[in-house]
Image (spheres, rainbow, N blue to C red):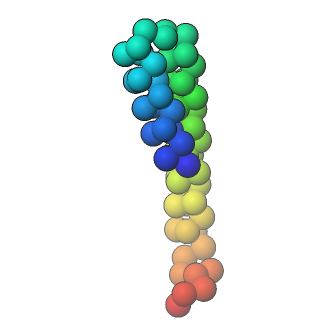
Amino acid sequence: MLWWALAFFVVAIIAAVLGFGALASAAATVAQIVFYVALAMLVISLFVYLFRGAQGNALT
């Protein structure tokens, strides 16, 4: 998911350099939303891992 945020960020940078202000703004907004969603999913999965412990881990 962070790859999508990075892709939209690159699109925003390229659009800004080329002078497409509205497109750059929209791409930057989407990249920011995708980044925060990925960050929230990381935090949630970290809490789930910490509270479940190694009992739910199929690799052990």
Horizontal and vertical percent position of residue 41: 58, 51
Residue 19, given in percent of the width and then of the height, sits at 43, 9
Vertical side of 44 occupied by 38: above or below:
above
**Quarter of the rendering containing residue 59:** bottom right
- Residue 55 visible? The answer is no
Instruction: Measuring from the top left, give residue 15's x and y in whole percent.
Output: 45, 19
Question: Total label count?
Answer: 0
Is 43 placed above or below 27 here?
below
The correct choice, above or below, for 15 with respect to 40 in the image is: above
Give the residue drawn at x 51%, y 33%: 8
Residue 38 horizontal/vertical position (percent): 55, 46
> Measured along the vertical axis of the image, is residue 10 above or below residue 52?
above
Q: Name the residue rendered at 46%, 24% in the picture.
A: 12
21 or 30: which is nearer to us?
A: 21
Residue at image coords 57%, 60%: 45
Q: Is residue 31 visible?
A: yes
- Please, which residue is most extreme toward the front here? 18
Nearest to the observer: residue 51 or residue 7: 7
In the displayed orientation, state which residue is furthest to the bottom.
Answer: 60
